[in-house]
Image (spheres, rainbow, N blue to C red):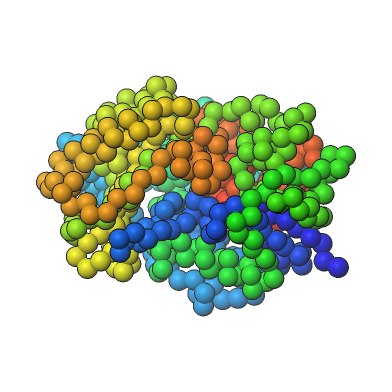
Amino acid sequence: MPKKALIIGAGIAGIATAIRLAVKGYDVEVFEANNYPGGKLSEFEKDGFRFDAGPSLFTMPQYVDELFKLAGKNPSDYFQYQKLDVLCKYFYTDGTKLTAYKDTDKFEQEVSKNIGEEASAIKKYTENSSKIYNITNHVFLEKSLHRIKTFLSWSTLKSIFRIRQIDAMRTMHQANQSFFKDERMVQFYDRYATYNGSNPYSAPATLNVIPHIEQHFGAYFPKDGMYSITTNLVKLAESLGAKFNYNSRVDEIVLERQIAKGIRVKDRLIEADIVISNMDVWFTYHQLLRTHPALFPKKILSQERSSSALIFYWGINKQFPQLDLHNIFFSADYKAEFNHIWQQKDIYHDPTVYLNISSKYKIDDAPEGCENWFVMINVPSNSGQDWNKLIANARKNIIAKLNKSLGEDVSELIISESILDPRGIENRTSSYQGSIYGTSSNNQFAAFLRHANKSSKINNLYFCGGSVHPGGGIPLCLLSAKIVSDWV
């Protein structure tokens, strides 16, 4: 009989883990509390508009392709995507507009023309970002930092010898200031801290590896939208024999002498050889292992949470040719904005606004002549704030900001609206306090402090997803599945 593996949660990491274990010959079952797969990577439709509800940036598609190849299939036969020539359009409060082209030479010319920074500064920064990636990728991202064998390989030892070069002792902001004269470019690169829910004024400059991932590997758009990543991988998992159980909230991980023996769902005990939690580690312990507090990793569970998001899904009764798939409208005072998020735990009156419009590439996401706007700002995780008041004020400020930049009263164009705040994120995805990326990366040891992919106290219990190593976001969640599979 094949060994039995139970996966708690059908987020992107849980789905990828199901695929990898099914390929290894495991009998795999996935249990999901919602009536749909994907976790944050989901979708919904309203008033003729389709919205990708969560992640909207697709990078490093090779990690998705790899799953099809493991199953002996040609990825392009099942999942198509296109590379973006324009990564993002940026709008500054002083009227400056900047288009981030994938083509490096074109981007350098754009920066030189619109901001006045020398191309040599961009080249130097790009080389530094690439260097950090080459030192850290195969150690910090693709392997567990909690296994002795990781540190016994020659490639790891070479990275350790170059550890000073990853710039962990400066903050991202300090490092970015050393590369650029113009504060607009500093702000441009500081923004990458938000890719894992962190603060550029606190997070280590090692995170300046993120621009390399976007610029070097590129950004992409799936032919059928972001949610097609979920649906296609679920189909792949099912074709390999994995079974998905929806509307099946797990009540408990069953232990016997600190060995995971299975799970309890609706008073039914389901036994297994291994259990993998794709649930946020905070809820895994406080809900599913609540009767075993002595086994809690208390220091990890008390770490600072990542930021959350406030999202307005707007159906817009007009098209804006000056906008692209990804658009950023910067705050005039970035430091004040992050201070409000991290110190004051509220929303700054002039937030940086991210605007995603998938109908630019998938025209049937909006009715003819309309656009589907995914409008997001970074906000603190939920710690009891008056969110109804914060949301009302943020909506006014966002609309005023967009009106000024676009020269149009956006409020009169909104014909459909839905809202997602940290409370909703926690309820829908079991993300503690609505934090999108689990714990923050606001100190130089953050990579080593994330929860391991295998429990050190409970045998046969593993973890995948954004709240554990190596972190949040689609690529890192997929890598967490790879690490779990290798460890198993």
Residue in the picture at 64% in, 30% down? 300
Which residue appears at 60% of the width and 42% of the height? 280
Q: How far across and down, in percent of the image, does residue 174 sit? A: 40, 28
Q: Quadrant of residue 85?
A: bottom left
Relative to the observer, which residue lies in front, 319 or 288? 288
Residue 134 position, x and y percent, is 55, 48
Q: Nearer the viewer, residue 67 or 125?
A: 67
Above or below: residue 321 compared with residue 200: below
State the residue in front, 449 or 267.
Answer: 267
Task: Left or right? Give the position of 310 relative to 300.
Answer: left
* Quadrant for the C terminus in the image: bottom right
Q: How many marks?
A: 0
Dividing the picture into quadrants, the one containing residue 451 is: top right
Whether residue 29 can be seen here: yes
Residue 132 in picture, x, y percent from top left: 51, 42
Q: Find the residue positioned furthest to the right.
A: 257
- Above or below for 487 versus 350: below
What quarter of the picture does the N terminus occupy?
Answer: bottom right
Residue at image coords 29%, 68%: 363
Is residue 197 visible from the viewing direction of this image? no
Relative horizontal placement of residue 77, taking residue 57 as reference (left or right): right
x then y, percent, for residue 185: 30, 38
Q: Residue at x 73, y 38 (%)?
A: 289
User: Among all residues in the image, which is located at the extreme top?
Assistant: 344
Position of 109 compared to 155: left or right?
left
* Outermost residue toward the front in this view: 267
Whether residue 412 is situated above or below residue 25 in the rendered picture:
above
Left or right, 457 with respect to 89, comes to right
